Amino acid sequence: MRLPLLIAGLLLVLAGAECRADARTYVSSEPPVTCCVAYDEALVRLQLQTREACEVQVWTGFRPRWAYRDGKRAPDGWRWADGGILAVQAPVGNVLWEFGLGDWPLRGGGPPFAVKVDGKHRTLAGTTFWAHRMEARARIQVPLGLYEVTLIPAYPVPHTTPAPELRLGDAEVAEWNEVLDVTGRAGLRAKSALLLEGDVGLHLRWEDSFTRSPVREVLIRTLATPTALAKVEPPDLNAPGAIVIEAEDFAREGDGGPVQVSRGEHADQHGGASLYGFGPGQGHWLEWRVSVPETGKYALYARTATQEEYSLRTLTLDRKPPFPAAALLSFPGTGGWARDDAAQWVWTLVAGADGRPPLELRAGERRLRLTTVGEKHVNVDVMVLIRG
Ligand SMILES: [Ca+2]
């Protein structure tokens, strides 16, 4: 948010040769000109349109230390006329004058900054500066994964400067948390983790007038890479102590949906129903309430189908990932959605094998949640907890 010192965006169209607001004359000229003058903190922008070249007086209230004419440095073409007034040349046609205090604002190509992945310098982002924004672009190569993104400013950026907008691949970041990085430097961290894969374009856009490049570096840190779940033989749903969780009996959902319940529209549904339309949209989650009769360690199996190559989910137990790999589980592609072909339903062992420990469940009601990461759907029929 920019705080106007006096009047922001004061648009004045001259009917005669003088332009007054309140008791002050802001712009005046001999022949009529059309003008728009905007006052900002230590910055005045004057747009002029005229049919004949002339000199225009504009009130700035300060003696400028720098001037731009149509985006180019302009040491000439204007003069200080005392009383807070500048005399400015207006050529035939349009011209944009900008006058300010302080250092010359950056225009055109600026200094690059580093983009680091997991602490390693990966590439430099080139910067370009305009009157009221900067932009930076780079490309990085990363394996499929969930990433934390932190922007380290080069200096304390005033609170009047809007938040930066960052695009990484298809992911957009407009909301940030203020954090301190491991070395104690202040940074801005994207509020959500980003799913990135392969050749990823970085495009940063930051609105403000900058006299120095505001970015020291952008840090990207791997939070999780996907753990592929292998297909397994169907578990025995009638095993002693097995807890069957019908997908369609979910208790809650959020951040997307609604998920669809299929009753007979898919092949070989356990319990007569299954779920489809789980996803798309980053963050769509489903939660199941599980009544656990006895405290113990349980393996978790799931019966799913997806035509996608894979489908990513985060698993939480009572709102926490039960083991690190649960942050990004990859359900395998099964060749279809199991609408007609029961063979497209496959079982995976989600917890309790391949370095993923079984779930330690206390007796009582537990909450199991699957949260979509990325955009890929998965159909879910049934899950089962089997005590080990
Ligand atoms: Ca079912």
Image (spheres, rainbow, N blue to C red):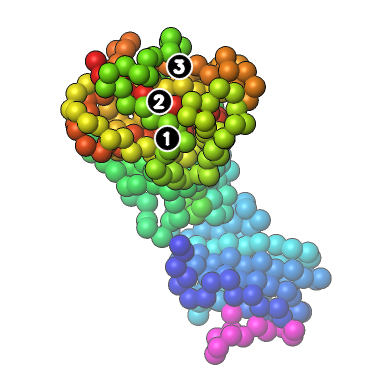
Instruction: Give the residue at x 25% y 38%.
Output: 365
Q: For the C terminus, give its image quadrant.
A: top left
- The answer, for residue 117, to whether it is visible in the render is no
Among numbered discs 3 and 1, the one appearing first in the sequence: 3
**Residue 20 painted magenta:** yes
Q: Amino acid at mark 1?
A: Thr
Which structural element holds mark 1? strand
* Element class at badge 3: strand
- Queried on whether the Cβ of the residue with tag 2 lies below 8 angstroms from ligand 1, the answer reads no
Residue 261 x, y percent position in the rendering: 54, 38
* Precedes in sequence: disc 2 or disc 1: 1
**Nearest the camera: 52 or 267?**
267
Q: Give above or below for 68 relative to 118.
A: below
How many other residues sit within 10 Å of disc 2, few (<14), some (14-19) or many (≥20)? many
Type of residue at label 3? Trp
Disc marking residue 371: 1
In the foreground, 58 or 279: 279
**Is residue 156 visible to the viewer in this orientation of the structure?**
yes
Q: Which residue is mark 2?
A: 383
The region drawn magenta spans 15-26
Q: Residue at x 68, y 72 (%)?
A: 35
Residue extending farthest right: 51
**Residue 343, image quadrant:** top right
As displayed, is residue 27 above or below residue 135?
below
- Please tell me the numbered disc located at residue 347: 3
